[in-house]
Image (spheres, rainbow, N blue to C red):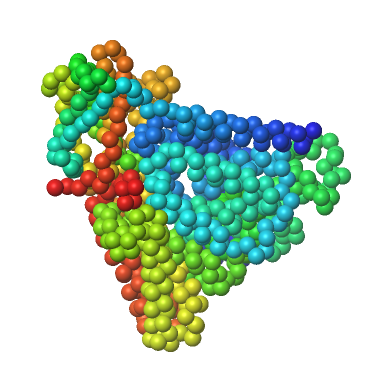
Amino acid sequence: MATQSSNPEVLPLEAAHFDLLRVPLIGGFLRWRHSRTILQVPLFLVAVVMILHGLLGPTLAPKNLASVLTWIHFRGALVLVLLCAGNFFCLACPFMLVRNAARRLFRPRFPWPRALRNKWISVALFVVILFTYELFSLWSSPWWTASLAIAYFVAVLFIDGLFKHASFCKFVCPIGQFNFIASTLSPLEVQVRDHGVCDRCRTKDCIRGRRQDRIEQAAPGTKSHATGNANGFVILQRGCELALFQPQKVGNMDCTFCLDCVHACPHDNVGVRSRLPGAELMVNPIRSGIGYFSRRKDIAALALVFTFGALVNAFGMVSPVYAVEAWLTRLLSLSHAAPVLGVIFATFLVVEPAILLGAAAWLTRALGGSTLRLVPLAVRYSYALVPLGFGMWLAHYGFHFLTGILTIVPVTQSALANLGVHLFGAPHWTWTGMPARFVQPMELGFLLLGFAGSLFISYQLAEEDCAPQPMRAFLPWAAVCLLIGLASVWLMFQPMEMRAMLMGG
Amino acid sequence: MVRNRRWSVGFSVLVALAGLYAIGCSKSPGALRNIAFTYESDPKSPRAGLNTFTVTLTRASGQPLAGAHVSLEADMSHAGMAPVFAEARELAPGRYQGTIDLNMRGDWVVLFHIKLTSGETFDRQVELRNLQAT
Ligand code: SF4
Ligand code: SF4
């Protein structure tokens, strides 16, 4: 594809896309090879402060930086940045800063085991985090919150200390998977500017990394940040650690926005460019580093946990959960929270999706005449539900973020006061954030946006699968979307309970 | 040499973490021994809205602790919510009463901040679960 066109009516490809890397100042900063470190350092320092305050500070969640920053600010900012831009949290991830520093001491030696090169571990960890969040009331415990952050640092160092490339990000990290699947709906993507340039490119540095022979490297003036390699060359700039080869990369799945490919490409041919959010969920090409979405049951499971997990997570905060817990406790004669919670999770994350998707897939075959078998059909349409899930995460986390955004001020004042630094007088405990009545219409907007997105993607998939009668294939999925959408709206308008413990235990 | 440096970095990090946990776990909530603290609430089962707490402070010997300053603070269990505050007044020697507005349903922690005439201070904490509107 050419970058210039002789026809002035037709926009050259370059001009058709907004490219963040072309924006003055921001673009220049992001193209600088140390930009990632510069973004990671402040987040790392915040993480250290959070951990210290979580372990040594007040035990009440609303007064501790660990719980306030994690459960109010980080989660809210994360989903809003994913909605408005892309996976910039992974770009600034403080865990990777520590990992990169540690890799100067410990070189990983092993490739990630072939049998584990999928998302099953990370999907399981995603569920475990949702489960422990409810079971141990992570939101109400600064100590647990700080311990979770420490566990994360330890896990990153352990996994990436042993295994090469970005094994932790790609195959283990539950936050990363959340970001990957949510960023399929982001408006920005790291992508090739001109595929013609890639066709002519001989080095493919975006995936191999920019290399130099050892003999050349020994010459005077060689840069010292290069990393050694047993194959007789040094890597001056690593290529994509997530195994995404730019010319064949489709969408944001698995992309950490680390910009290594941007720095490695010798032709300045990689940008951070605008695209239609969610478009990658409507198509099924082979994707570099991923394969076909339609064959990836593990990624479909991630999409389902992302979607139905959003509902479970919100359900844990509203009033009817008490009644359900009490009913289950009586029914099953249980005395501990874990099995009750296990039943709730199994119902929401396994039984409900199996029934809904199974029925819709069966109807798609019966009514629409799709020739696909039930499981491949369910896998294919699982991706259509991602916008609904994202709408729910946005509504939930956005609510806490917007209604509690200013609480960071008094909590910081109080933390400093404990150190003898009195900033702007006594802590302003009345500072919270936007009134809930203003935030609720926004929540509804997020849910409706998600609902519309899921309907649109379902219809696109139905059109592709059952071209003669797409509407008949679409209707069962529209019904699934409607049910999830109604459940989300019902959940959002329940009186919120700021709970501490399941079953009062 | 490099190997030694690796292990000393790893070991130092482990020691620092163990130290943090040791300090964190040894924190005491600042309560004084030999002082009995009891409280009653009105309504008897606290609910969302106005609640009156009556606190009785006595020495272990049973002698009432008069002249103390008692203030109330209530926080929700979830971050992002503003705490509420109230002052208690002394009804009789060693008996203090304050009314506080628990302005949302859900789980609350009520803190009684107590300052004795001797200048000693301590807190007592009461957890109120699943508060409902009447
Ligand atoms: S992105 Fe750059 S390095 Fe990669 S194939 Fe294209 S031109 Fe070559
Ligand atoms: S190097 Fe890979 S993970 Fe990093 S921005 Fe490029 S494609 Fe994404």
State which quarter of the image contains the N terminus of chain B. top right
Q: Residue pushed farthest right?
A: A215
| Along the line of sight, the residue nearer the viewer: A450 or A499 | A499
Compared to A314, does B87 lie above or below?
Answer: above
Q: Position of residue A207 (x, y in %)?
A: 69, 57
Picture layout, residue A160 above or below residue A119:
above
Q: In front here: A111 or A238?
A: A111
Name the residue: 41% across, 65% down: A346
Depth check: A82 or A468 in front? A82
Q: Quadrant of residue B27?
A: top left
Residue visible at 31% across and 69% down?
Answer: A483
Query: Residue at the spot x=36%, y=81% of the render?
Result: A471
Q: How many marks on residues? A: 0
Residue A384 location (% of width, % of height) = 43, 69
Residue A120 vs residue A459: left or right? right
Residue occupying the far front of the picture: B61
Image vertical order of residue A226 relative to residue A169, above or below: above
Report the side of A18 relative to A348 (left or right).
right
Rendered location of residue A101, percent (x, y) = 66, 39
Asked where in the image residue A325 lies, by quadrant, the reply is bottom left
Q: What's the residue at 68%, 60% (across, down)?
A: A113
Question: Is residue A492 visible to the viewer in this orientation of the structure?
Answer: no
Q: Position of residue A284 (x, y in %)?
A: 53, 72
User: Can residue A420 be seen in the rendering of this structure?
Assistant: yes
Left or right: A7, with A324 as reference point: right
Q: Which one is in front, A122 or A429?
A: A122
